[in-house]
Image (cartoon, grey):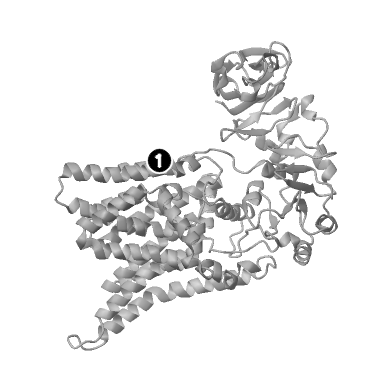
């Protein structure tokens, strides 16, 4: 139970982060589908994955996982990221009982099965990816339960297990056919073994038992096979409707899925597979210790060890590129390797070594696995942030939700469309130089409102691609923004209004181009009503509860990422007013100043003189009663340099407003007063 508790803790590290570490390309694709399924209430089989233009569906897997995530989010109010993680983690834990029961078929007693489960629970891969926004654990759950039910149904002739085998097989084949295929290997091998021993022989004449087993095997697999083939055909038929998705048809993916010529003998492929094993699955000393334990102490377990290891290696041989290039694919096969290693621990338990030696050795193995997690995947996982980039933040502000984006710089990745929350036409790498392809792709968007086009600054594509975008997509040929060498072009008809109405004037690592930067800032001199802001503009205040009724800001609000966390840019003067009922209240706010305000390398006169942080109760006549006031000066006071938690208790005699005020320091200068406001909670 301690290992289950640790796994649950590890899986929930940075649970609130919107950033999906590990396989972000694939996680963003799954999340994008779920987002638009939820937004459009679209539970059709041709579900939306809007990254390759019209029609917006390019189905890969059957959307059972996405539907489950959306339904959970709708029922509980969880945001999609947390709902996706919850579904994945639940599927992982539901897989463990099936593994426990399967180990019994390998002649392990209940107590002897626990070390194997311990290896799975301490495996870095299953801590890191058990909570990913991916179909992997759902596919694993269905596949392992199918294998268990298949064995029981055929062996015992039990109709209840037969029904379960069909249900689990259908689920496995629909959710991820490559995972299902992997577990058909041991199912098929076991079935052949059963048939071989039930054949007609001199000592067992007749074919009755053989034919009976054939019937049960067919009854447990025919429907899952048929349903899987039906879905693959339907998915291909749907993808064929999109002229930009031809490369995703099953016939065009055979080489990629099953390995191009020479892949199985490629040193680079096997080097990558070894890296996945040693960094994500098993610490090399653990691998050596468990292998040695089986070799020296576990002769009676050699067959079981070989079976698990052979099926694990079979996955690498069957899908060499998929497993080498995508570490999350090992979610399907990793339990087989860990099962093989587990027999080393079982052999240790059964040895004549004293228990005072055996138990510390087993704990050391678990500790080694956890140390591998702490030293590698934990560092990637433990990073709380909003996800996305300055580019996606800009696209979210510069385009409307009903508009789409066109991008020719990031293959067909869903990352930018997902974080920008926009439908997209992603022009695959290299295709931006194919005039015929791009012309047809642009023409396929006829009638669609295009909000922005993103092209490489130095290598946008074939000569004339900008002019074609202007003619076909009605894009202004003058870019407005540059981010990491990418130029952003806006819809020509809305360019002026978009820039004129923009309250947020800067995006992370983005640079406004000549004649594009919005001039003036209405919020510097005029109170802006929160209720009248566009939804994307309100996102700057999403970490406040309640949201402010109105605000005034000299430089305009925006979000900055510091140490992986979002902070509201609140440079002096910033005023936030909140409407509250009468009664006692507590305001809790996090505050910090950017380290660049007080860096030691700055001359003393160039450092910020600090800011004033105050809270006022606003009377009916507009006057303010001071509830709290403090001068925060990190250049002089070292305790002011870290994030500060400011708490203010107060009572309002009648309903009214309070104002959170951030102003310049005692010298009246706001030079380098880069103030940042974290979550604000008023109870």
Front one among 203 and 286? 286
Q: Does residue 649 appear anywhere in the picture?
A: no
What's the residue at 70%, 59% (across, down)? Answer: 427
Figure quadrant of the N terminus: top left
In this picture, residue 213 sits left or right of residue 358: right
Residue 578 position, x and y percent, is 65, 25
10 Å crowding of disc 1: few (<14), some (14-19), many (20+): few
Identify the residue position indicated by label 1 in the image: 9
536 or 677, which lies in front?
677
Q: Looking at the picture, how far across and down is residue 360, in whole percent?
A: 23, 42
Q: Is residue 440 above or below residue 75?
A: below
**Location of residue 310 (image quadrant):** bottom left
In the rendered view, would you say 645 is above or below 196? above
Spot occupied by residue 99 in the image (x, y as percentages of width and height)? 32, 58
* Quarter containing the C terminus: top right
Residue 256, can we see it? Answer: yes
Residue furthest front in the image? 267
Viewer-nearest residue: 7 or 427: 427
Q: Position of residue 516 (x, y in %)?
A: 82, 39
**Quarter occupied by residue 644:** top right
């Amino acid at each position: 139970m301690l290992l289950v508790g640790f796994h649950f803790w590890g899986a929930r590290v940075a649970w609130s982060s919107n950033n999906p570490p590990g396989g972000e390309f694939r996680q963003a694709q799954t999340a994008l589908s779920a987002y638009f399924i939820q937004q459009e209430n679209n539970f059709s089989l041709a579900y939306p994955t809007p990254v390759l233009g019209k029609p917006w569906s390019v189905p890969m897997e059957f959307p059972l996982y996405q539907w489950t995530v959306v339904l959970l989010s709708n029922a509980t109010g969880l945001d999609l990221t947390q709902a996706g993680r919850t579904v994945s983690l639940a599927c992982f834990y539901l897989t463990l009982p099936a593994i426990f029961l399967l180990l019994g078929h390998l002649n392990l007693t209940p107590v002897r099965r626990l070390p194997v489960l311990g290896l799975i629970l301490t495996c870095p891969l299953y801590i890191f990816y058990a909570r990913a926004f991916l179909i992997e654990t759902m596919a694993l759950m269905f596949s392992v339960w199918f294998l268990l039910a298949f064995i029981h149904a055929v062996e015992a002739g039990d109709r209840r297990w037969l029904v379960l085998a069909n249900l689990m097989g259908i689920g496995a084949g629909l959710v991820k056919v490559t995972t299902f295929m992997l577990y058909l290997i041991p199912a098929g091998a076991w079935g052949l073994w059963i048939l071989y021993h039930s054949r007609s022989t001199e000592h067992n004449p007749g074919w009755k038992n053989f034919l009976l087993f054939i019937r049960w095997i067919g009854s447990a697999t025919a429907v899952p096979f048929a349903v899987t083939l039906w879905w693959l055909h339907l998915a291909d038929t749907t993808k064929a409707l999109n002229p930009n998705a031809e490369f995703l048809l099953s016939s065009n993916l055979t080489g990629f899925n099953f390995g191009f010529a020479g892949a199985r003998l490629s040193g680079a492929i096997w080097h990558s597979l070894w890296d996945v094993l040693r960094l994500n699955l098993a610490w090399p000393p653990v691998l050596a210790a468990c292998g040695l334990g089986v070799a020296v102490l576990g002769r009676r377990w050699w067959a079981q060890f070989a079976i698990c290891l052979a099926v694990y290696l079979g996955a690498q041989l069957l899908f060499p590129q998929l497993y080498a290039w995508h570490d999350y694919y090992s979610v399907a096969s990793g339990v087989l390797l860990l099962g093989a290693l587990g027999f080393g621990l079982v052999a240790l338990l059964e040895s004549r070594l004293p228990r005072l030696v055996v138990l510390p050795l087993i704990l050391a193995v678990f500790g080694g696995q956890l140390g591998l997690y702490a030293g590698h995947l934990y560092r990637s996982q433990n990073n709380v942030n909003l996800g996305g980039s300055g580019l996606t933040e800009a696209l979210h502000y510069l385009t409307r939700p009903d508009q789409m984006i066109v991008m020719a710089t990031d293959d067909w990745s869903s990352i930018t469309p997902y974080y920008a929350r926009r439908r997209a036409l992603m022009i695959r790498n290299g295709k931006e130089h194919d005039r015929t392809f791009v012309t047809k792709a642009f023409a396929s968007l006829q009638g669609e409102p295009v909000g922005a086009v993103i092209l490489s600054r130095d290598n946008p594509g074939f000569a004339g691609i900008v002019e074609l975008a202007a003619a076909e997509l009605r894009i202004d040929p003058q870019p407005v923004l540059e981010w990491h060498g990418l130029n952003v072009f806006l819809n020509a008809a809305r360019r002026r209004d978009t820039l004129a109405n923009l309250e947020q004037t800067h995006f992370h690592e983005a640079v406004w181009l000549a004649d594009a930067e919005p001039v003036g800032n209405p919020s510097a001199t005029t109170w802006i009503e929160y209720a009248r802001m566009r939804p994307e503009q309100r996102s700057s205040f999403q970490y406040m509860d309640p949201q402010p009724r109105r605000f005034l800001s000299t430089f305009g609000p925006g979000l900055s990422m510091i140490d992986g966390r979002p902070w509201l840019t609140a440079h002096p003067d910033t005023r936030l007013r909140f409407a509250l009922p009468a009664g006692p209240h507590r305001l809790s706010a996090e505050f910090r100043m950017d380290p660049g305000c007080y860096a030691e390398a700055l001359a003393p006169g160039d450092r910020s003189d600090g800011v004033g942080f105050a809270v006022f109760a606003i009377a009916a006549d507009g006057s303010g009663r001071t509830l709290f006031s403090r001068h925060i000066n990190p250049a002089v006071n070292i305790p002011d340099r870290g994030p500060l938690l400011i708490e203010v208790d107060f009572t309002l005699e009648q309903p009214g407003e309070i104002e959170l005020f951030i102003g310049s320091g005692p010298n009246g200068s706001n030079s380098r007063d880069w103030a940042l406001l974290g979550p604000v909670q008023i109870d």
